[in-house]
Structure formats: structure tokens, C-alpha cells
Amino acid sequence: MNNFYYKEGITFINDEDTAISNDIQKMVVDTLVRNSAVGVVSGFYEEGYPIYFISQFALASVGYDSYTLKNEMGGKYIECVCPTDRAYYSRFMEWKGDAPKEIEYRVKNSKGEYIWVRDVRADYEAEDGRRLWISSIRVIQNEHMARKEFISTISHDIRSPLNAIMGMAQLAGKNINSKEKVQSYIDGIITSAEKFMYQISEVLDMNELETTVARLEEKEYNICSLADSVIKGCSAAVKARGQQIVTDYSGITDKNVICDGRNISKVLDGLISNASEYSPKGSCVTIKVVQKDNSTYEFNVIDEGEGIPYYEVDRLFEPFERIQDARSAADGTHMGLGLSVIKSIVELMNGTISVKSGTGKGSCFTVRLMLKAAVSDECVTDKQPAMVLIVEDNQKNAEIMQEFLALEDIGSDIAYNGAEAVDMYESTKGRKYDVILMDIHMPVMDGYEAARRIRQLEEVTNITTPVIAVTADSLPEDINQAMKSGMNGHVSKPVDYDELVDIIRNAKRG
């Protein structure tokens, strides 16, 4: 037995050594750090990969003792590996390229159970010329199974609404002469499409928060109007479940604040949707906003569901977790990312989220944010007439947008590519349009170039027109590129038209 300088005991299996060189110790520590691991095993590049030494943590992780490993398994590490994974493991051990030497596979513990581990490997040549491998071992059973279950779930949950959409579309076509039936199918298509988009948004939001540096976009909002706009979007699904939404804004003194309305809307939408899905028919979902002091606002979303067992509460905000208890949603909308995404967004806004719940007691999710009161009492949702130039190469998308805007008394013209948009802007000398809604990927001239050309024309007209990107490109780098080309804002497709109308009015007012 020997002690590393990082204070872990090791056992030699196939050699009588009692110490390890400083070089090997350094490599051991390096692999442990790379793998966030505590266990390490080393061996030789020989048949069966005989073990040189193994740490006590590694032994404990796989559930063996040194006697069993040495005498019953021949001291060969390959005997620890699941038989069906051995060929895969051997190919990994034979790899001599420059790529990171990392692998996940199963090992069989002393109880005969297979558990998943992550192995990060380094190579070392001993003084006698023998080649050594040094692997840090980290058990990832729970992580691996959660992700595996998540992939299975996402496949099912995405296919389900798509199947419903396709089925109802076909039924609508077969019953084209029945207005009542067609309307029923259209309502069903919209509901399924909303569910599908929510699921896709969960995955994309988590990916964006994990892989990019998100940023806040703060401006003035009426906090009550902001919450009401979210509730409006959720109301159809809530009513369909036979529930009602109750609001309480009586605890707010300063209603106009500077905040990231888009992210607050995402948080409230997710919490309200959760509350509704996990509550019975005939119940109420309560949204209570309270101003605790000059700058502290609490958003409480309260449901009358079965509640969450106390021992499950800590798992609620973990990614890929789906708690199998009284809160399991009947329609399976959520894939285990929703609350994790919500927590990440809240923390991005320097806020906190907590939950009070218990079996049979319902749940109350509380988001606490520090918001600065706006100097002006002017609300951002003033409804003044506007004229918009829609730049969109897909005719159907352009016409749908035009119809939605018309419902809000917003007039519009359509340009089907960037070049047409530049010509239409130039012909009116920039005086006709209050806002330009710009698609990005178009024939003849894309949206980036069109925005740059319009900004050049403005040097002559001395009139600046807000240009808003309306595109499926929604990563931070896409938004940055839009801003660099001279655009003022960004809306992701598929378009939330309530949000788009607010953006148009805000841009016109600004």
C-alpha cells in the first residue's frame, strides 16, 4: 500500500512495487482533473490489459476488493469490462491518435451488476520500455441513464404531437364540407403545434444556456401588462383543462420597470404551463406579483395540484430529471428540461427561484428578481397606427404575417427579397415605413446586405428606420451578426405575433 500526495491509497496487483514515480503521479492527477474523478487504475498494454495498480476509490466504485481482482479475475482489467463492450474498449485502448482519449463503457461489479463509467486515459513509457496506460474512472450510472431515458422520452414526446398534427390535418381534408369539424381539427392542430414548439424550445434553450454566453436585453415594461400577455398565451390550454387563472397585482407599487421582458415571459410561461398541467380539472392557477421593496419583485405561481414529496423537491431543477410521482403531467408535455431551463434563465437575470410544496398541498414557485423602476410612467404597449415593410421570400409566411398585423391595425407592404426591400425603401425616401421586418435567408439579396444598404441610404435621407430581424436563426452569434449589419432587434421563428406587435410598437415609439 502506498499513499499518493493527493491522499489516496493504492494497491499493486501484478507487480511487487511499493512506490510510484513522480512522473506517473503527475499523470494520475492530470487524468483525475480532466475527468472530475477520484478513482484511478493503471496497467500494461498486454493481453487482457493486466493491472499495475488500482486506487481504493476505483475499487470501491466498481465494488471489488483487491483479492477478487487479483486471484479470481487474473488481475486483468478486461475482465471488469462488460463482455459486449470489450471489443469497443479494446479499440479504444489501441487508439494512438492525438484525439482526447476518453470513453464510456460498462463494468461488472462484484454483485454482477453492470454500471456505466467514464474513462479518461493517458500513456506512459516505463524505464524498462513497457508501455503503461493510466485511466481515471468516474461512475456516471445516474447521468448516463438519465440522458438515455431523456433521448427515449424526447423521441416519443416529439413524435406524439407531430402524429396528432398530421392526423388532424388529414381528417380536416376529408371533412372539408363540415365547417364545425374542420374548426375542431384546426383547434387541435394549433394545440399540438404549440406543444411541439414548447418541447423544441426547451431543448434549444438548454443548449443555448449551456454552450453560449447569453445576454440580457432590458427595456421598459409595465410588469402587469407583461404578465397579462403571458397569461393570454396560456389561457387556451388552461381553459381546455377546465381550469381558470387568477391574478393578484395588488402588491405592486411601481408597475413600470426596466427588465428583460422576453426572459421574464419565458419563466412565467413555463411556470404557468407546469402549474396547469399538474393541476386537476376545476382548479385555479394563481399568479401573484408582489413588490417587496423599491427594487425586489416576487412572482408567485401557485397551483392546486397534488404537490411534490419533500424528498423529490431537490431534483426538480436538475436537467433530464422527470419526477415520477403525483406531479406527472397527464399529457406528457415536458421532457425534463423545463424547470432546469427556467432556473438557468432566472439566474441569468441574477434572481432566485424556490418552491414550497408537499404531498396533497399543491405547489408555489417563487421567482425573486431585482428590477429598477422606470423613470417614465409611459407604458410600452401604446397602440398607435404603424406602417411596416415585411421582407420575406416565403409568400405564405408573408401573407400570414400581414393578416396578423392587420388585426392590430398595423398596415404593411411585402418585399420578397432584400433587393426589393432596398428599392421600396429608396423609392419612398424612408418616409413610409415605421419599422422593417427583415428575413435573413432570401434569394437575390439576403437580409444582412439589405440592412446595410438601407443604413447607407439613411445617410442621405437622415431618417432612421428600425430594422427587426425575423428569422429561424436564433443563436447568439446570429443575433450579433444581425446587430452588426445595422438591425435593431431580433425575433425568432416561429413568430409569436403578440410579441412581434409589442416589438413593432416599442420600435415605433423609440
Image: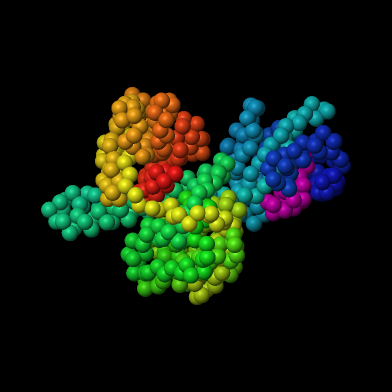
Q: Report x, y in % for residue 215.
A: 55, 44
Q: Is residue 158 above or below residue 293?
A: above
- Is residue 64 found inside the magenta-colored segment of the image? yes
Q: Is residue 234 above or below residue 453?
A: below
Q: Quadrant of residue 41?
A: top right
Q: Which of 196 and 476 lies nearest the eye of the viewer?
A: 476
Query: What residue lies at 55% left-to-right and 57% top-to-bottom?
Result: 373
Q: Quadrant of residue 282?
A: bottom left
On the question of residue 100 being in view, the answer is yes
Q: How many marks?
A: 0
On the question of residue 315 being in view, the answer is no
- Is residue 224 found inside the magenta-colored segment of the image? no
Q: Residue furthest left?
A: 177
For the stretch drawn in magenta, the main secondary structure is: helix
Q: Report x, y in % for residue 321.
A: 53, 56
Q: Is residue 268 above or below residue 155?
A: below
Q: Using residue 438 as the reference point, say whether residue 67 is left or right of it.
A: right
Q: Using residue 68 as the reference point, say whether residue 468 is left or right of it.
A: left
Q: Report x, y in % for residue 19.
A: 86, 40
Q: Which of 166 and 22 lies nearest the eye of the viewer?
A: 166
Indicate the quadrant containing the C terminus: top left, top right, bottom left or bottom right: top left
Q: Which of 201 and 129 lies nearest the eye of the viewer?
A: 201
Query: What residue lies at 64% left-to-right and 26% top-to-bottom?
Result: 97
Q: Using residue 179 as the reference point, say whether residue 404 is left or right of it.
A: right
Query: What residue lies at 32% left-to-right and 47% top-to-bottom?
Result: 385
Query: What residue lies at 47% left-to-right and 67% top-to-bottom?
Result: 249
Q: Residue furthest top?
A: 444
Give the magenta range: 51-72
Q: Report x, y in % for residue 269.
A: 44, 57
